């Protein structure tokens, strides 16, 4: 499972490496960043459980949203995940994907964050709380989106 970090220079989708000419992060210009985490492989049916992925934040950031998506949609029930920082949930409403949908961006209720401050080297763990009842779903990824602190 892979982790991918993308840095945006804050100009409507234009991407530039931090510190490159014409953009980048500075103390006054906070970069929009997205950290992607694979919580499963692409084909194996999802199962519930804790510590599906664990990593340490590579830098401090203020989280603005979390998106989740799958390659194979869950059916007959919603897919629900939780993300914990140092053992405590970061949500008051967890992200979910409703039956037959591929992501929580276009399908499903918006997750509500109860904690947005992610410290440098904070331990992040991912849990799958519920899977589809007929088809569990497969190929789950989560994206942490926010601004570098």
Image: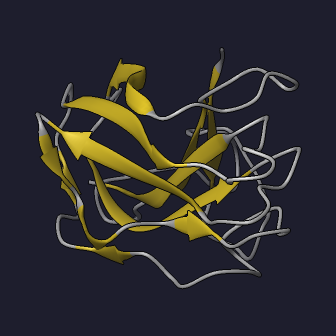
Residue 14: x percent and y percent? Answer: 79, 62
Q: How is the image coloured?
A: secondary structure
Q: Nearer the viewer, residue 46 or 18?
A: 46
In the rendered structure, the answer to whether residue 18 lies left or right of residue 102 reads left
Q: In this picture, is 128 found above or below 100?
A: above
Residue 116: x percent and y percent? Answer: 23, 64
Residue 17: x percent and y percent? Answer: 67, 38
In the rendered structure, the answer to whether residue 57 lies left or right of residue 122 reads right
Q: In this picture, is 87 found above or below 56?
A: below
- Which quadrant holds residue 91? bottom left
In the rendered structure, the answer to whether residue 139 lies left or right of residue 77 reads right
Q: Nearer the viewer, residue 93 or 132?
A: 132
Q: In this picture, is 13 found above or below 127?
A: below
Image quadrant where one finds the C terminus: bottom left
Residue 9: x percent and y percent? Answer: 62, 59
Q: Residue at x 31, y 31 (%)?
A: 125
């Amino acid at each position: 499972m892979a982790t991918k970090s993308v840095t945006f220079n804050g100009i409507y989708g234009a991407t530039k490496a931090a510190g490159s000419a014409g953009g980048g992060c500075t103390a006054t210009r906070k970069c929009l960043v997205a950290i992607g985490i694979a919580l499963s492989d692409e084909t194996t049916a999802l199962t519930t459980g804790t510590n599906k992925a664990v990593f340490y934040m590579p830098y401090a950031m203020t989280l603005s949203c979390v998106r989740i998506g799958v390659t194979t949609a869950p059916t007959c029930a919603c897919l629900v995940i939780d993300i914990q920082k140092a053992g405590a949930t970061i949500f008051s409403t967890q992200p979910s994907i409703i039956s037959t949908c591929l992501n929580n961006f276009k399908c499903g209720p918006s997750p509500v964050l109860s904690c947005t401050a992610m410290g440098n080297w904070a331990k992040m763990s991912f849990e799958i709380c519920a899977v589809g009842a007929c088809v569990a779903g497969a190929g789950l990824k989560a994206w942490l989106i926010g601004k570098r602190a």
